[in-house]
Image (spheres, rainbow, N blue to C red):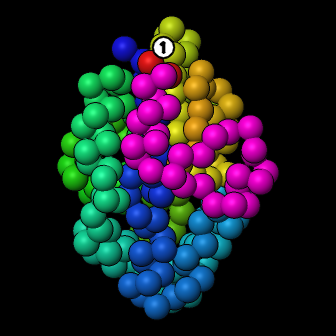
Amino acid sequence: MNVLCLDLEGVLIPEIWIAVAEATGIPELSKTTRDVPVYDDLMAFRLEVLAERGIDLAAIQRVIGGLSPLQGAVDFLAWARQRFQIAIVSDTFYEFGMAMMPKLGDPLLLCHRLKIDGGRIVGYTLRQSDPKRHTVRAFRSLNYSVVAVGDSFNDVAMLEEANFAYFYRAPTNVLERYPQYRCATSYSELQGWLSVAT
């Protein structure tokens, strides 16, 4: 069986930070890797805003608890499980993402960890440097064929290493910079491409 590496936010679930921005009324938190391609720069900005506004981990987890998978995502994953082994390869954190895994059928989640002090988010620890690239390389080193699907700048490394690679509902600025990748606009369209990739 081949491996399907999927980004999480924007592909299977809503963008967590956008949901937090809307729930807290802090628009600055709506920035994602679609807006700030360098992940460390984006996280430094987010942590600064959280500290200034007094937003703790519990507040963010309450927002996440109210989120549901994107419409059609659960059915798409059920279809994909019949054809692939699935790994969610994300730049989110276990303290955020694990709450969504039961809603998605408990796929493997590979992501990062937060540093917490007294309930406040004070930093984070990456699983490894350039994790999405290394995840695909690791699967390929085990002689798996890998299909990768993402929606943003931080997914490009994963797409570059995969045997087959696609964007899913990526914004125009991402597509203009990386026109070599086709972009599906629906799960049904993506399923058609993945059927060929298998």
Residue hosting label 1: 144
Where residue 130 sits: x, y (%)?
65, 39
Is residue 191 rendered magenta in the image? yes
* Quadrant in which residue 106 is drawn: top left
Q: Magenta residues? A: 169-196
Q: Is residue 134 visible?
A: no
Q: Residue at x 22, y 52 (%)?
A: 103
**Closer-to-camera residue (133/194):** 194
**Closer-to-camera residue (71/38):** 71
Left or right of 12 on screen, residue 196: right
Q: Residue at x 51, y 16 (%)?
A: 145
Amino acid at circle 1: Tyr
Where residue 171 sits: x, y (%)?
63, 61
Q: Residue at x 73, y 61 (%)?
A: 173
Where residue 154 sits: x, y (%)?
64, 49
Vertical placement of residue 119 versus 180, above or below: below
Is residue 137 rendered magenta in the image? no
Q: Is residue 25 visible?
A: yes
Q: Residues within 10 Å of mark 1 (few under 14, many from 20)?
A: some
Vertical placement of residue 106 versus 49, above or below: above
